[in-house]
Amino acid sequence: MSLSFSVTGLVSFAPAWTDTDEANFVNVLDSSSVSITTPLTNGTGDDQADGYWRDVVTIAAAGTYEANLKALPRQVMGGTADTDFAKVKLLAVRNLSTSATLDVGDTITDRWTALSASPITVGPDAVLYVVHPNAGYTVGASDKVLAITNNGGSAADVELYVVGVLA
């Protein structure tokens, strides 16, 4: 039996605004929409991925969660195994807290620097969604830990999604 893998990421937004020119009693309306679809098929090349990992973690107040992209734990048939990524094609970090601010990519030993040279702030009820379907973001032996720090005064639940090429 062979397994197949595919994933489609979809980002969609539709901003709209109305402005009233009171001097001329005219309403000016503007709206637009953007829908960006990123399909990834099974494989290890451009626009392909062969691995997926998802988890919901709770980060204590002022605490840091360390996601080692070379050893992400998962449950398999009653046991455990690690998911080892060589490249990340899609990363989503969803802050489920209504009050805590997160720093994604905080400074730590073996920090994963492929995403950003500095931490990226993710506010309450916000999502960091990054897609690099072609080459992907490289994960190395000493460039592998995605640190997420909770800057809030209470625990924060965080959803994490990683899609990429397995090592």
Image (tube, grey):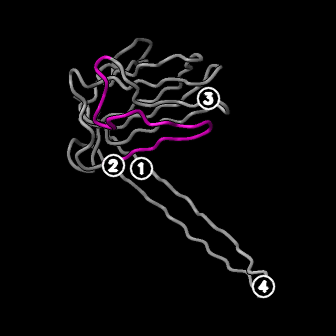
Quarter-of-image position of residue 95: top right
**Residue, x 48% and y 35% (percent of image)?**
93
In the rendered structure, are the residues bearing label 1 and label 2 in contact, judged by CB atoms less than 8 Å apart?
Answer: yes
Q: State the residue lying farthest toward the bottom.
A: 24
In the rendered structure, are the residues bearing label 4 and label 1 in contact, judged by CB atoms less than 8 Å apart?
Answer: no
Sooner in the amino-acid sequence: mark 4 or mark 2: 4
**Residue, x 41% and y 33% (percent of image)?**
119
Query: Residue at label 3?
Result: 100
The secondary structure that most of the magenta stretch takes on is loop
> Secondary structure under badge 2?
strand
Q: CA distance from mark 4 to mark 1?
A: 48 Å
Q: State the residue lying farthest toward the top.
A: 79
* Residue 42 placement (x, y as % from top left): 28, 44
Q: Of the numbered discs in the image, which one, if any, rests on residue 40? A: 2
Query: Residue at label 1?
Result: 8
User: Considering only vertical position in the picture, is 26 above or below 104?
Assistant: below
| Residue type (three-letter) at the residue carrying disc 2 | Leu
